[in-house]
Image: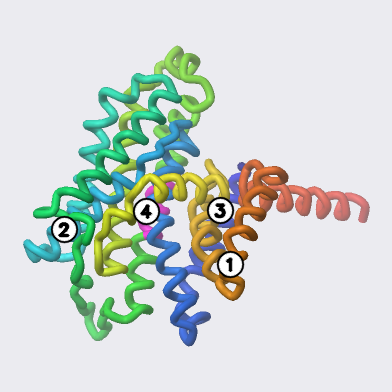
Amino acid sequence: MTRSFSNLAALACLVLGALAPLIFGGQPYVLYVLTLALCYTIPAIGVNILYGYTGLVSLGHMGFAGVGAYTTALLMKDVGVPFVPALLGGALAAGVLGVLVGIPCLRLRSHFFIVVTLAVGMILFTLFNNLDALTGGAEGLPGIPRPAPFSIGPIDFEFRSLTGFYMLTFVVTALIFALQFVLVRSDFGRSLSSVRQDEALASARGVNVFGHKLMAFALSTAIAGAGGAMKVLFLRAAAPMSFDMHESINLMMMLILGGAGYLVGPVVGAITFIAVPEFLRIAAEMRFIFFGFVLLVLARFAPRGICGLAESAYKKLGRREKTVVGYS
């Protein structure tokens, strides 16, 4: 991945995301779909850190998102904790659980690790579904309050409106995107890439392979927890079906569709995966067939996802411009 392409794509996403309320202000349904896509972008960023940069596949990540979601919901609904500490509490709970799961499981070979994460996700889903006194069971937790409004000088911020909550979700996503940006550009991020490419060589060069994997897994689960929290705050209800195995597989598909290992891969994947089927509702019976066909075509002709396809086009365009300049 070229750094210039990566930076350009990240800047384009940030500008378009910030301008979305102005562009789609008169179309609440579009803004609703974009907000939901941002709620999925956050856990997809966590999966990107784990799979795209470290090479570990997790099929239970929405279970960790559920831990963050229920923790944040309970803190805000039953204890009255404000939004920011409740969100951090949800992310912390998911991250701590990630450490507890990662310590015994990250020494397993890759396919065993995949099976363990799948099992952990199913256990968490069962707990969400059966701990009625805590999670509300299959009916879930309704009536989760919106974050309280606040003011900075003469400017008021409120989150009851769709536009207000979109901007809140955009800011949270942008902060987590910035964390990913700093992480992958750091020595730690480069060490993660070396672990993904060759664990034995990375270990021989002094990289603590297990420690790096554990930290990546903890960060990834904490980010997933924050994403789950934003999702239930947006929907104002936490339900077990939002965090089951299918949702975890969808998360992986979003990342592969957008481009694993690309900074903007989770953003592109989540928006495409959430938005395209919604906009195909005009052909309700055929939309999933059409969407599945699109996925098959992309898997065949763009194995590095949409971002990989865009990067190839960007490189070809750059070479063509150099050729023209050299000729003139």
Q: Which residue is mark 3?
A: 7
Q: CA distance from mark 1 to mark 3?
A: 39 Å
Mark 1 and mark 3 lie on one chain; the one further toward the N terminus is 3
Identify the amino acid type marked 2. Gly
**SS assignment at label 3:** helix
Residue at figure coordinates x 43%, y 49% from the top left: 44
Q: Which residues are magenta?
A: 173-182
**SS assignment at label 1:** loop
Q: Which residue is mark 4?
A: 176
Q: Position of residue 188 (x, y in %)?
A: 40, 33
Q: Which residue is mark 1?
A: 285
Q: Position of residue 201 (x, y in %)?
A: 50, 15
Q: CA distance from mark 4 to mark 3?
A: 16 Å
Q: CA distance from mark 3 to mark 2?
A: 44 Å
Mark 1 and mark 2 lie on one chain; the one further toward the N terminus is 2
Mark 1 touches mark 2? (CB < 8 Å): no
Disc 3 packing (10 Å; few <14; some 14–19; many ≥20): some
Q: Which residue is mark 2?
A: 136
Identify the amino acid type marked 4. Ile
Mark yes or no: residue 85 visible. no
Between marks 4 and 3 in the image, the one whose residue lies nearer the viewer: 4
